[in-house]
Image: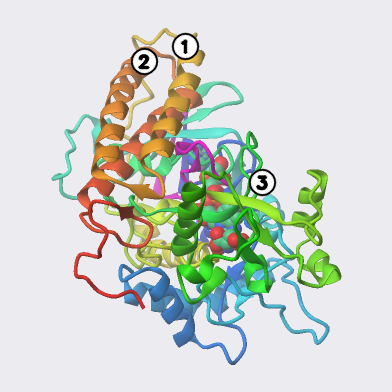
Amino acid sequence: MTRKFDFLVIGSGIAGISFALKAAKYGKVALLCKTTLIDSNTSYAQGGIASVTYAPDTFEKHISDTLISGDGHCDLSVVEKVVHEAPSQIEELLNWGVAFDKNEKGLFDLHREGGHSEHRILHHKDNTGFEIQESLIRQVKTHPDIEVFEHYFAIEILTQHHCGQIVTHHTPNIECYGAYVLDLNSNNIHTFLAKITLLATGGIGSVYSTTTNPEIATGDGIAMVHRARGAIKDMEFVQFHPTALYHPGERPTFLITEAIRGYGAVLRTQDGKEFMHKYDERGSLAPRDIVARAIDNEMKMRGHDYVYLDVTRMDAKETKKHFPNIYKKCLELGIDITKDYIPVSPTQHYLCGGIVVDKNAKSSINRLYAAGECSCTGLHGANRLASNSLIEAIVYANAAVEDAAKRIDKLSFNDCIPDWNDEGTSLTEEMVLITQSFKEVEQIMSSYVGIVRSNLRLIRALHRLEILYRETENLFDKSVVSNEICELRNVISVAYLIIKQAIARKESRGLHYTVDYPERMKNEVRK
Ligand code: FAD
Ligand code: SIN
């Protein structure tokens, strides 16, 4: 079956929904998600959303903090754009009903996180993302020009390749005409034709064995663009959150927000000693890459699986008020955070790289935009500043709409696309091979492509992954298409891109630290 929409939006987190709500002014929108609307990384966000709100904070300070965190790899003009446009996008969220916490004076209660020189994080208790996601869903559900498709899995974006043309990395003007989508409710594959397509497919946590990301984070958008010969970069900059709750077996790993360190919590080794000042004068509030590496080092030196986060010295009533969900979650595990230290360890959390986009959120493929975690705008550089992700997603979704609105009337549908061809596929019983291969990818990435890297480990990871790649492509060619086999292909592509781009970077910078090149290439000193 073929369906036609002016705008096809793949992904229903903050990037996808905010785009859909604005694009609907200019045409009919299809909003797809592979599970349910609520199931996104956005829903899990705890700390909040960064934006300059009151003095003494200034745009210059937010810009400077972002650049320092990004370790010399940010695009200054992008940082300026996001920081300057943030307040107006916060207004949009407020208009859509997002309730950020206020203090007794009626002013926004601003939190502070690692790498921020001021209190500038707007938040809703310690579950800001859920508040945002719910508010956006309320808007989208009642919108007459947005059709929502839950349990619709995008398999492949459509380009000239699907009209029989040979497309290579050198093909000029590759264009996107929509996507093949598997309807998981009926198991039919539909052709969604669109004048404009937005990828907002989120993160890649499923590539690692421990992650704060929900299961949907399999890097589908990045893998689809890679297969379509689009540009992907900065994949080596995988962010590990320093303080995920140490609770083996739980997936996703529960996050202990960085805002708790901004509030006063400190890190301690298992014998109760503070250690962060040995690594950085900003102590527990140093940028995330530095804190994660310091914890990793302390754990390795001592042979420990976790360190402690200590918030016991703060006022118990205030702690419960600011962090009610963390308090509740830990209490369920027998940890009263107002009295007990919290066991934490670093865990995969975010990807700074992704689909290369310009300042209008346009990818290297014509008619294809990308926003949110699947994209690489240049904002985060080599290490994202905490709480800069949600704001980047909404600023770039807005930029995409503004650009697309100018051209939508001049675009038409491309009717050359044939229906999905599943000739020659018959295998349906290889589920166990798929789950096993998934685990192998996670193990390869967690063992060899973690916080501290080396040439030897990266090459070993590449060799092991190549075997899985060949086996999986073979399986895919013979199998009746399913979301599971597609996701496996996608995580293998994403893992491949991370390893290849990590091997190519002959220096240590931000989140990419390798023992073979421990210095920055130009030997700059990190401020
Ligand atoms: P997501 O919100 O992840 O949405 C992805 C969407 O894509 C989903 O709807 C999914 O179904 C859909 N999708 C994916 N693949 C397909 C496919 N093949 N077909 C159809 N649909 C598909 N950032 C901050 O700025 N502040 C924070 O405090 C913060 N805290 C965080 C806490 C946690 C625990 C986590 C995991 C992340 C946190 N982040 C935070 C990061 C931030 O939440 C994410 O980067 C951001 O929400 C990503 O939004 P998104 O719209 O790009 O994607
Ligand atoms: C957190 O709350 O610590 C997560 C913030 C982020 O990832 O931006």
For residue 161, side relative to residue 92 (left or right): left
Q: Which residue shows up at 63% across the image and 45% down it?
A: 246
Quarter of the image that includes the C terminus? bottom left
Mark 3 near mark 1, Cβ–Cβ under 8 Å?
no
Q: Position of residue 17 (x, y in %)?
A: 57, 55
Secondary structure found at label 3: loop
Report if residue 211 lies within the magenta region.
yes
The residue most toward the left is 170
Q: Is 247 or 140 nearer to us in this picture? A: 247
Residue 468 lies, with reference to residue 3, above or below; the image says above
Secondary structure found at label 1: loop
Residue position for label 3: 38
Residue position for label 2: 475
Q: CA distance from mark 1 to mark 2?
A: 8 Å
Res 422 seen here: yes
Mark 1 near mark 2, Cβ–Cβ under 8 Å?
yes
Q: Is 67 or 218 nearer to us in this picture? A: 67
Chain part drawn in magenta: 190-212
Residue position for label 1: 430
**Closer to the N terminus: mark 1 or mark 2?**
1
Q: Amino acid at mark 1?
A: Glu
Secondary structure found at label 2: helix
Q: CA distance from mark 2 to mark 3?
A: 32 Å
